[in-house]
Image (cartoon, rainbow, N blue to C red):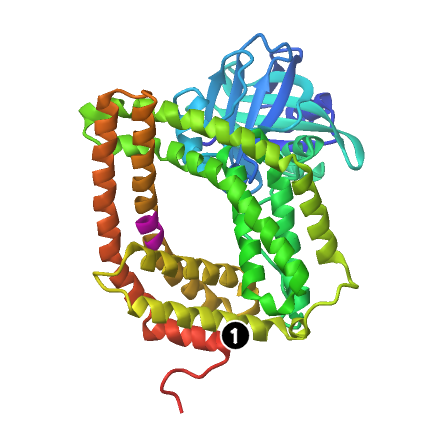
Amino acid sequence: MIEGYFEIQNCAAAEIIEQISTALSPRYDVEPQTSGDAVAVTFYDSFDWRLFRAGYVLQKNAPPSGTQPALLRLTRLTGSKASTDRQAELPPGHTPGFAAELPEGPLADSIAPLLEMRTLLPSNEGHGRRVEIAIRNEDQKIVARLTLTQIELTCEEGQTSLAQLHCRPIRGYPKPFRMLEKTIRRLAAGAASDRGLLARGLFAAAGREIGSYQSKLDLALDPKMTARQALRHILLRLLSQMQVNAPGTCAATDSEFLHDFRIAVRRSRSAIGQFKAIFPPTERQHFSRELRWLGQITGPTRDADVYLLAFEDYRAMLPRERRDDLLPLKRFLRERQRREQRKLARALSSKRYEKFVADWHGFLTDEDTIWQEASLMPIRQLAGKRIWRLYRDILRDGALITAASPDEALHDIRKEGKKLRYLLQFFDRLYPQSTTRPLAKTLRNLQNILGDFQDYHVQSVALRGFADEMAEKRKAPSETIMAMGLLIEVLAGLQADARVQFDAAFAAFSGPATENRFRRLRGKKKRGAP
């Protein structure tokens, strides 16, 4: 038997209790054990709704005074009800944030792999009354428990009342629990229940719509669109992603705001670069320059974020007795991150950034702007042409790679692969999923290896620079400098391993199955076909 909760709209607590009592009578008695304690209800999720997308809701029930412990409950949404998965007690006044800040236990263990580096953001607080109810049999033994929480909720339709019922079984008494659940299901169905309505309403009151943001692009492009129509649609979506992530980036709420901001910038630069011939030259040069500026001002902070996120992995690469020697490096990186974050926040609060957003939006929405003649081409035709050309470029450059090739040669292939990946992301709706998904997977495998190869190289170079700076400024003992040297050696070994893996990944990418899929995107026949 699994605990569960239901929601019933516009039905008073007294009426719900009376109906449950009538349905269970005469075999069971329904006994309210409290008169209705005040409770404050808040829901939490990441900015990109990682818990909700995984099928969970995180709810905190607390006394309104904030001077007593609160209960944090993680529930899984399944079918017509939600079942309790994990719960933990929070100290008075504690606000959930990163998973590492939650009380140790099953709830934190469940949330950590879902949230990863994201922090929890709260909904508005809902206030109401909570009644604890016991279900007793003829022997006056408690055979099931029920908590009824009634919240007054303001929504688009006006003021509404919502009751949340949390059912809990008692070991050895499955039948009364099943009867209780059956009764509540019937009540919920007859009272216009909307599972998750309370969470949706309280998040809406905080200005957030559940599931409204995700970093993954989902572009509804029509194959009949012209290149201009499609590119405007894509670039406006990317501008929107920059705008929604900018406040969290400035506030350093968590590192993913900046990460998503930078991805939107890179995708925008790539879209302009791959379709130079359709943009008015003056505007293309201006906005490309502004987007490059955004990439430059966000880079140092993101680099510091990446090193801090990877810090525990760095420690794990060293012998156990040497791991604490790296702790001064973490302090150094935190100082660096705070310094760069302040510069970034100033840049994103500047007149230049404000003007860029206004001008870029104005350009993309201006129907009177004259674009190049090529912008009138069907987007499916133009996209297929660009995808095919990038694929051929990667094949050409990859075939030239040997054991003696410099690191920069593999990095160039990685950059070409990024451009190709962005094009596949932009235009996957224009082609059959049976073609684009295998291509995306094969390219992703190649890109992951090239990404690891480049990252290990960049991190090694950066760590050498950090070691020199820390030694010069006397911010670390010799043990830390030596540990960083050992870490650089480990990274060099990992880079060599990634280099070995490249050949197999490139062979898969350049194989006949992949080539024939790219040929289908371009409208070409299979190789060797008559």
State the residue in front, 469 or 143.
469
Residue 494 appears in the picture as rendered: yes
- Which x, y percent locates residue 167? 54, 26
Up-down relation of residue 43 to residue 408 (above or below)? above
Side (left or right) of 75 relative to 41:
left
According to the image, label 1 marks what residue?
Answer: 385
Which quadrant of the view contains residue 7? top right
| Mark 1 surroundings: few (<14), some (14-19) or many (≥20) residues within 10 A | some
Q: Quadrant of the C terminus?
A: bottom left
- Please give the name of the residue rendered at 64% of the width and 42% of the height, measured from the top-left corner: 243
- Please give the name of the residue rendered at 74% of the width and 67% of the height, measured from the top-left corner: 370
Up-down relation of residue 453 to residue 271 (above or below)? above
Q: Which amino acid type corresponds to the residue marked 1 in the rendered image? A: Lys
Q: Does the magenta stretch include residue 432?
A: no
Side (left or right) of 229 relative to 439:
right
Q: In which quarter of the image is the N terminus?
A: top left
Side (left or right) of 463 relative to 6:
left
State the residue in front, 99 or 184.
99
Q: Name, please, the residue furthest toward the front.
A: 472
- In this picture, which residue range is highlighted in magenta? 450-454
Q: Is mark 1 on a helix, strand or loop?
A: helix
Q: Name, please, the residue furthest toward the top.
A: 67
Up-down relation of residue 99 to residue 368 (above or below)? above
- Which x, y percent locates residue 99? 45, 27
Which quadrant of the view contains residue 501? bottom left
Residue 3 appears in the picture as rendered: no
Which quadrant of the view contains residue 508? bottom left
- Report the predominant secondary structure element of the magenta stretch: helix
State the residue in front, 456 or 468.
468
Q: Name, please, the residue furthest toward the bottom.
A: 530
- Which x, y percent locates residue 321? 18, 23
